Image (spheres, helix red, strand yellow):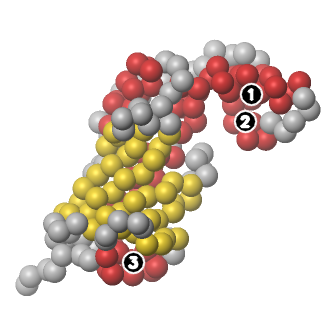
Amino acid sequence: MTTQPATAADLTRWLDEAGIEHEPGTRDGEIVATLPGEKKLRTVVSLVVGEADLSVSAFVIRHPDEAHERFMRYLLRRNLRLRGVAYAIDGDGDVFVTGRVPLAGLDATRLDQVLGSVLEAADDPFNELLVIGFITSMRKEWDWRVANGESTRNLEAFRAILEHRAPEVETDDAH
């Protein structure tokens, strides 16, 4: 039995069946899907159907303001555990998660696994990446909001670090 390679129409159907928000992208064969997150509100994923494979790419976080080596080491250690995707940086140092999946044998189950890997890679470490690469900016923002009576709601997950000047947690994600 020969399995036909997956097509953009198959991808669209699978995303519809899974209830995943999506729309056509700007490139040939591209579908842009939006995955809801917990730490990061949403992850926008570009799915490009090529001749032999599906290219998957999602923005994770912009380049860090500080602690560059620690930030990159953290990502590289996490790469060891990722399935089917990996962290990469663009020319500006912004972080993406990318992968390629052969179209032959791609089905709804495999697509779900790949999208799960993308979401885990983008959402799970998001707060740690913010603390490692942006703590000085976050502290300035917290101080300004408190001094001006502005809401600190979007920084609540970091209250202990920002309010009490507790040292940021050392993350050794090598396991």
Image position of 85 with respect to 30: above or below: above
Question: Is residue 112 visible from the viewing direction of this image?
Answer: no
Kind of element beneath mark 3: helix
Numbered mark located on residue 141 in the image: 1
Q: How many marks?
A: 3
Q: Quadrant for residue 108, please give it.
A: bottom left
Q: What amino acid is at disc 3?
A: Thr
Q: Are marks 1 and 2 in contact (CB under 8 Å)?
A: yes
Position in image of residue 10 (x %, y %): 32, 80
Q: Nearer the viewer, residue 90 or 39?
A: 90
| Horizontal side, residue 170 vs residue 2: left or right | right
Q: Quadrant for residue 37, please give it.
A: bottom right
Numbered mark located on residue 12 in the image: 3
Quadrant in which the N terminus is drawn: bottom left
Q: Which residue is mark 2?
A: 155
Q: What amino acid is at disc 1?
A: Glu
Position in image of residue 48 (x %, y %): 31, 64
